[in-house]
Amino acid sequence: MDMMPCMNVELADLLSKRGIFSVQQLLYPPKATLQTMIGNFPASKLYQDLQPFPLIKVKLKLQQKDSGKSHSLDITLVNTNFRQNK
């Protein structure tokens, strides 16, 4: 998390007390929830720093070919971090 410009010791301590130890854990909650978690620290600054981080969803699909004699695995990666456009 130290790669975020807004991160400092105080904010890292606040987050760790709430069980947040990685950037990935910060990508899920909405801005209002972030504000509740971090108290007096401005959530907008944290929210802004989170925008460039991708939130990737992996979709797997196993397909049978040739009457079940062979298989193929289709893997799709989707960036679900819609904050990038807001």
Image: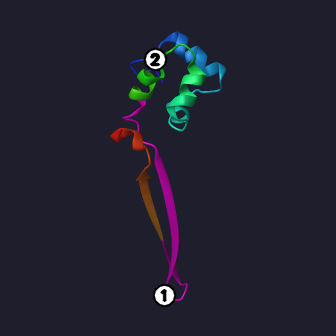
Q: Residue at x 54, y 27 (%)?
A: 34
* Amino acid type for the residue under numbered disc 1: Asp
Which label sits on residue 7?
A: 2
Q: Residue furthest front?
A: 32
Q: Which residues are magenta?
A: 50-72
Q: Residue 51, image x and y in percent?
A: 39, 34
Q: Which residue is mark 1?
A: 66
Seen in the picture, residue 36 relative to 24 is either above or below; the reply is above
Label 1 crowd (10 A; few <14 / some 14-19 / many >=20): few
Q: Is residue 22 visible?
A: no
Quadrant housing residue 81: top left
Q: Residue at x 43, y 24 (%)?
A: 44
Q: Residue 45, image x and y in percent?
A: 41, 21
* Amino acid type for the residue under numbered disc 2: Met
Q: Residue at x 49, y 55 (%)?
A: 58
Q: Is residue 58 magenta?
A: yes
Q: Is residue 84 visible?
A: yes
Image mark count: 2
Precedes in sequence: disc 1 or disc 2:
2
Q: Residue furthest left?
A: 85
Q: Residue 26, image x and y in percent?
A: 53, 32
